[in-house]
Image (tube, helix red, strand yellow):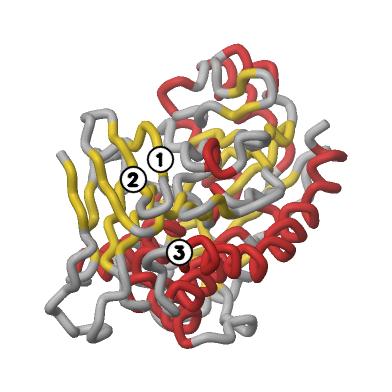
């Protein structure tokens, strides 16, 4: 199967003249924001996502007020992702808004269950080949395929892998009405908490319910427990091989003894409401252990191919800068490619994007590495 999207669109809902075509590999937050931004810049966009369309869960995410946003595209993406409200939200809520916008955009083709196996380019085109032997071709290709990026192998063959930081984060979101009423935080309780642990620490966040309600009993509690004692378990179960993270530790794969030990540790470390939230997550196996990886980029571009988001730069979540960096990647890339990317201008345009984003991307990752070296090693 071969698709070529170089023909100009007759739909002028966003921009009257199409300015070429782009393939985006990955439909997580960075991929969706990049696809939307490139569409606004006039490109016909095809987003290829390896998993199905079933909504995915995720941790709590803070979308800030956007003081660093300097372009209309960045401000548009910020408003779209946050729904115009500065608050912490479930990753899934933000992803749903971005996905809905992408699916409604006539310039965007969003394809699920489409796993990219390899990426190639020549002086005129770039193309992605899937595990079903489909070929998708365009003027540029953007790797937004996360910390185990396939696209990064071509862009940075000398440094293809993110490195395990030496710890994991247990994460979950719990409905407030699933914990005892006496443990529920008051309406005036701080939305963010960092209770003191014993050698480890926890980030707790109170967020709106799935229906947006902030009424007492209808909210949700998101928690993230940083844990540096599970490295042997991660290696034994294949979550980490050598220094490369292979996959997360999903609930059904967590050994029963590990859950028992977590519950015991939680009982002496954490205060309410986080203790009951954690215990409920453990009892219902509603938690995920995410091994943390880091990646400091040396380059973001090779020819007609560029990286954004976690594929480009992977900081520890403690920096709370990953989402904002991904948004700036998408907005900056769109501003650059709006100048046209057909013919020989594609590589030059992407190099301009790299010159604007590389230094900042490196600094974001490096800002959290001192923590990882002390906590994870």
Residue 338 versus residue 163 in the image, above or below: below
Residue 162 versus residue 21 in the image, above or below: above
Mark 1 to mark 3: distance in Å? Answer: 16 Å
The numbered mark at residue 127 is 2
Cβ–Cβ under 8 Å for marks 1 and 3:
no
Cβ–Cβ under 8 Å for marks 2 and 3:
no
Q: Position of residue 135 (x, y in %)?
A: 24, 40
Which residue, given by chain and number where applicable, does mark 1 sit on? 120
Residue 344: name its quadrant. Answer: bottom left
Mark 1 nearby-residue class (10 Å; few <14, some 14–19, many ≥20): some
Q: Position of residue 314 (x, y in %)?
A: 63, 49
Cβ–Cβ under 8 Å for marks 2 and 1:
yes
Residue 186 appears anywhere in the view: no
Q: Earlier in the sequence, mark 2 or mark 1?
A: 1
Q: Position of residue 102 (x, y in %)?
A: 27, 66
The numbered mark at residue 344 is 3
Mark 2 to mark 3: distance in Å? Answer: 16 Å
Q: Secondary structure at mark 1?
A: strand
Could you tell me which residue is drawn at 55 percent across and 66 percent down? 348
């Amino acid at each position: 199967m071969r698709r070529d999207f170089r023909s100009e669109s007759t739909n002028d809902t966003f921009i009257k003249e199409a300015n070429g075509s782009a393939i985006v590999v990955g439909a997580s937050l960075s991929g969706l924001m990049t696809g939307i931004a490139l569409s606004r810049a006039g490109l016909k966009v095809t987003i290829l996502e390896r998993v199905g369309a079933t909504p995915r869960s995720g941790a709590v995410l803070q979308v800030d007020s956007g003081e660093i946003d300097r372009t209309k595209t960045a401000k548009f993406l910020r408003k779209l992702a946050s729904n115009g409200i500065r608050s912490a939200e479930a990753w899934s809520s933000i992803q749903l808004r971005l996905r809905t916008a992408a699916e409604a955009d006539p310039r965007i083709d969003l394809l699920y269950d489409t796993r990219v196996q390899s990426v190639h380019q020549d002086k005129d085109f770039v193309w992605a080949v899937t595990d079903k032997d489909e070929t998708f071709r365009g003027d540029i290709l953007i790797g937004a395929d996360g910390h185990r990026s396939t696209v990064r192998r071509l862009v940075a063959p000398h440094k293809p892998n993110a490195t395990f930081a030496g710890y994991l984060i247990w994460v979950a979101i719990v409905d407030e009405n699933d914990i005892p009423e006496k443990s529920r935080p008051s309406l005036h309780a701080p939305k963010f908490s960092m209770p003191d642990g014993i050698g480890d620490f926890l980030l707790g966040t109170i967020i709106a319910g799935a229906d947006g309600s902030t009424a007492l009993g209808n909210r949700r509690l998101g928690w993230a427990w940083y844990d540096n004692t599970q490295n042997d378990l991660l290696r034994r179960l294949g979550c980490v091989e050598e220094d490369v993270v292979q996959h997360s530790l999903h609930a059904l794969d967590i050994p029963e003894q590990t859950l028992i030990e977590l519950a015991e540790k939680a009982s002496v470390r954490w205060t309410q409401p986080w203790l009951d939230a954690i215990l409920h997550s453990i009892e219902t196996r509603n938690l995920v252990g995410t091994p943390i990886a880091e990646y400091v980029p040396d380059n973001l571009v090779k020819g007609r191919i560029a990286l954004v988001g976690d594929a480009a730069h992977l900081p520890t979540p403690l920096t709370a800068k990953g989402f904002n960096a991904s948004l700036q990647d998408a907005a900056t890339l769109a501003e650059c490619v709006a100048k046209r990317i057909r013919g020989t201008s594609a590589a030059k345009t992407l190099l301009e994007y790299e010159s604007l984003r590389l230094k900042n991307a490196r600094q974001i990752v490096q800002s959290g590495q001192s923590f990882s070296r002390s906590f994870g090693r």
